[in-house]
Image (tube, grey):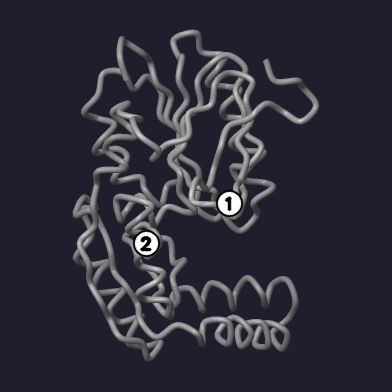
Amino acid sequence: MAGTFQMAIIACDVLEDEVNHFAGQHEHVARLEFFEMGLHDQPNRLREVLQECIDTCEADERIDTVVLVYGLCGKGTEGLRTRRCKLVIPRAHDCVTLFLGSAKQYLDLHQNCSGCYTYTPGWCRGGRTPGRARFTRLKEEYTEQFGEESADYLIDVEKEALAKYKTGLWVDLGLAPDRDKLKEQARRDIAGMGWEFRDIAGDARLLRDLLSGDWTGERFCVAEPGQVLTATTDDRVIIAEAPVDEPSS
């Protein structure tokens, strides 16, 4: 990106280590906000929280660009907009693309390994990946909400939904300080699921360029003030367009 600019970064804490690493390399990062990964379970709530944060960032006169370290995330980012600043988001369905380095790598993964479930350091640390920690957390949550019998039933439904997976795929960028511990946790959880363990190297280029301001090509959606983020059904994933109730200029 030519010229000087001041950026606010809004990110999911599943990428906290990675974002802190790259954001710390740039003087143009004026503000950094993280939100907890559990918001992905409630896309409408995620959208509300992110829009509130965008509005807060825009009230900071230093900021002229807001960067979202999210993907489409179950359409939790659809409908977001700025009024004064540029809004930038990678063209990605979810954060796995940011670990793999490109939408092409993401597509190739899903075409060549349709039975793969991806494990990353942040998801493992948060107990969000299939394994003992996740099922223990879900059992406690469901028991509190619905009672023990219903909790057991819901856990069984969860496990049935995972029956299509055969492989647990570990991918990371080598930046999490506890990566070795988390990788071994993932290995145990994957074995406990009866799946094959695979390990592939991540690629930091997409995240690095997102945070540096190199938004060239078709990798990123750059929305101008007033435009709205909209999901697509093609390879673009996310586009910026005028709101339906406002005429385009």
Mark 1 and mark 2 lie on one chain; the one further toward the N terminus is 1
Q: Residue at x 50, y 45 (%)?
A: 236
Give how far apart the Cα atoms at labels 1 and 2 are. Answer: 16 Å
Q: Classify 9 as above or below 125.
A: above
* Front position in the image: 102 or 74: 102
The amino acid type, in three-letter code, at marker 2 is Arg
Q: Position of residue 115 (x, y in %)?
A: 42, 80
**Label ID, residue 166:** none
Q: Which residue is mark 1?
A: 39
Image location of residue 154, percent across then percent down: 66, 82
For the image, the number of numbered tags is 2
Residue 155 lies in quadrant = bottom right
In the rendered view, tell whether residue 162 sits above or below residue 243.
below
- Mark 2 crowdedness (10 Å alpha carbons): few <14, some 14-19, many ≥20: some
**Which image quadrant for residue 142?**
bottom right
Q: Residue at x 62, y 50 (%)?
A: 75
Quadrant of the rendered image containing residue 147: bottom right
Where 56 sits versus 52, above or below? Answer: above
Image height check: is 61 above or below 11? above
Q: Which residue is mark 2?
A: 125
Q: Secondary structure at mark 2?
A: helix
Q: Nearer the viewer, residue 69 or 237?
A: 237
What is the quadrant of the C terminus in the image?
Answer: top right
Q: Are marks 1 and 2 in contact (CB under 8 Å)?
A: no
Q: Amino acid at mark 1?
A: Leu
Q: Nearer the viewer, residue 40 or 92?
A: 92
Estimate the x, y position of residue 44 in percent, counting from the top left.
69, 48
Image quarter where the N terminus lies is top left
- Name the side, left or right, on which 129 lies relative to 153: left
> Percent position (x, y) of residue 122?
36, 57
